[in-house]
Image (tube, rainbow, N blue to C red):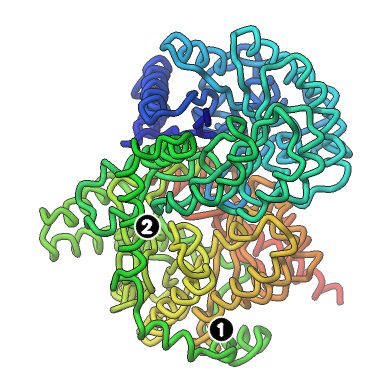
Amino acid sequence: MTKAHILGFPRIGAQRELKFAQEAYWRGDVSAGTLQETGKELRACHWQQQAAAGLDMVTVGDFAWYDQVLNTLALLGALPERFGFDAKHLSLNDYFTAARGSTQHVAMEMTKWFDTNYHYLVPEWTNTTRFDGGIDWLFDELSEAQSAGYIAKVVLLGPLSLLYLGKAKQGLQHKLELLEKLLPAYQAVLQRLQAAGVAWVQIDEPILALDLEQEWLEAFVPVYTRLASQAPDILLATYFESVQERAALLHALPVAGVHIDLVRAPQQLPALLKDWPINRVLSAGLIDGRNIWRADLSSLLESVQVAHVSLGDRLWVSASCSLLHVPVDLASECLMDAEIKDWLAFAVQKMAEINALKKALDGDRQAIASQFDAADKAIRDRRLSSRIHNPLVQKRLAQTTAADAQRSHVFSQRIVQQQQRFQLPLFPTTSIGSFPQTMAIRQARAAYKRGELPHLEYLEAMRSEIRHVVDQQLALDIDVLVHGEPERNDMVEYFGEQLWGYGFTEYGWVQSYGSRCVKPPFIYGDVYRPEEMTVSWSCYAQSLTDRPMKGMLTGPVTMLQWSFVRDDQPRATTALQISLALRDEVGDLEKAGIGMIQIDEPAFREGLPLKRSQWAEYLDWAVHAFKLSSAGVQDQTQIHTHMCYSEFNDILPWIAAMDADVITIETSRSDMKLLDGFGDFAYPNQIGPGVYDIHSPRIPRVSEMQKLLQKARSVIPDRRLWVNPDCGLKTRDWPETIAALKHMVEAAKLLRASVAEDEHSECCQS
């Protein structure tokens, strides 16, 4: 019989129960015991849902209090030594300190999980890193599942991916040097799982989908030869891209099964089936674990029939990757348009689709005939719906030319006019966009959306907050202001709500990092802007001050990446449709007198394909999309963009090609190391490297910011260096924000004074 399983389930809860429990614990409102009880209830619920969906085993080890990579470090006893924690007696408070920082500790660096919008905490590897074993949370969770009567498959992040995804520090020459110390820790975990009666362990090695160096590839066979010797059956899981070129390696591995992603790379199945080892399981990732569209069950069944004939009960069916990346349950969506709702599937529904494919493969098609019929109808109705295509949008896009994506003059000419217009000091200070969103702001927005708050009262509530934000920035003496974005629920959802072609959910939350959850909109049709979206807010804010006020927009690539995107046309086409909508908004902001317009692209690198051979195609259309949205302005209008939590060095030519006048980037957690590439490349435009981490409650000292700015000066010329936080301040509270920004402004002023003094001394000496 075919087996059905999943690689992982969303951990946050259908109503974000984990988020609220985490934040209550951080505030001191609840005890660690209360938080742990919430986690236990969520795990029990998720296992019950997996069993009810007809899966053959539940997945244990996919739950994390903050991040699965951090969980792996805690399990192995390998948290960064600088924290000084007792690995075997790690408390929840210790765990969260590593993730979020404290007054004594800088948080671990955070970056994107491959090409998703999930952020993981980056391991810190040194010559003295230890793997002597840590806390037993995984084994406690296994005991919970077994006590409830479930057959449990345990999931672990693989040792090679764990090493690869970390950073070598303090003299460590190569991360693979740690392998001999790491493997005994994995062997000990696997032996304990075997002793506990676990039959299958899923070990995730997503780096197999990357362009790996030969030394990493050569490590796989010896590593898994050692691990498999005393362990449950190992299912090696790959995802996010094809591993077709690794077929010989995968065939040689001494594992009991391999999982492949047949959503991202359906073409790899024939190559991997050829000479597939006898008695080896193939887990087929048929259901999309990263998007919310209902599956075409009939087509998927047909696509996997050859594999079923070849493998029989050695074929398993699953989602392409962990369901961490999709919302929990479509049944919660009571207000959604019925026609569109019928096109969608969330995690719970995807498990039902997996089970339907299992039953169909096992010859029980009659039992799920109605499910297949409903899926066939939904696919057909979506394809034929009049909501999907807009001839006006398609015609306009077809008429765009390369000239539409070019500024009138090069940066060296534009900057002269911009300096004359804005008269900014050396090292101008600014923020990224959002300011703290208090409970009062959220309640006012929610009441307005429910129709309980009249429009004029809502308008005044938002304007009152904008006045407050502007007053605070003026009191801090910040040079370039923002309006704070109190009217915005989310940087993508806010714009999507005002664009045709976008759909929305009430409870479609997914985890971005820690307790940070986002509710991505979904793009189901051609995108069009019917009217202005931000102009009135920006104009009101600008009316309160003579200082420059940035207009704030979310860029086309980020609007694409942070939405669930339609799968019936190329992603590039959808991105360019968004670009044209944003181009109209940029033009209206400029006409209204807004002289600085920030078009944020934090997801620019996130969209980069995992295979380098596909980079150029993506980067070319992504750059074109940004420039199409931004290039229609006059030289004296300054275009900003913001990027965060990504490595940029290998794509700097394309970032430069975006031709933003000012780019702000996240650099504080990396101690400005992310900035090095910009210096080596001689990035030509202005840069604002973040001088403090907004994802941590910790308030850095002025001296720390000065130190970071001095490092930035070694890379970026003074006349092109801006001073700003790493990211928006939406998630922080006001006391933290004021204190941190006060230190930031003071650091910038001290640096200006230092430079002026140096210049004066040089002048006197000459």
Res 418 label = 1
Q: How many marks?
A: 2
- Whichever of labels 1 and 2 marks the residue nearer the N terminus, that label is 1
Q: Residue at x 20, y 47 (%)?
A: 334
Q: Which of 255 and 281 is in front in this view?
A: 281
Q: Which of 543 and 234 is in front in this view?
A: 234
**With 203 as the anchor, is 51 left or right in this view?**
left
Amino acid type at circle 1 is Gln
For the question of whether residue 24 can be seen, the reply is no
Residue 207 in picture, x, y percent from top left: 71, 43
Q: Residue at x 67, y 76 (%)?
A: 657
Circle 2: is it few (<14), some (14-19), or many (20+) Cα within 10 Å?
many
**With 508 as the anchor, is 93 left or right in this view?**
right
Res 16 label = none
Circle 1: is it few (<14), some (14-19), or many (20+) Cα within 10 Å?
some
Report which residue position mark 2 lands on.
521
Task: Say above or below: 11 vs 77.
Answer: below
Residue 738 in picture, x, y percent from top left: 44, 49
Q: Which residue is drawn at 25% across and 46% down?
A: 333
Task: Say above or below: 705 vs 565.
Answer: above
Amino acid type at circle 2 is Pro
Q: Quadrant of the C terminus?
A: bottom right
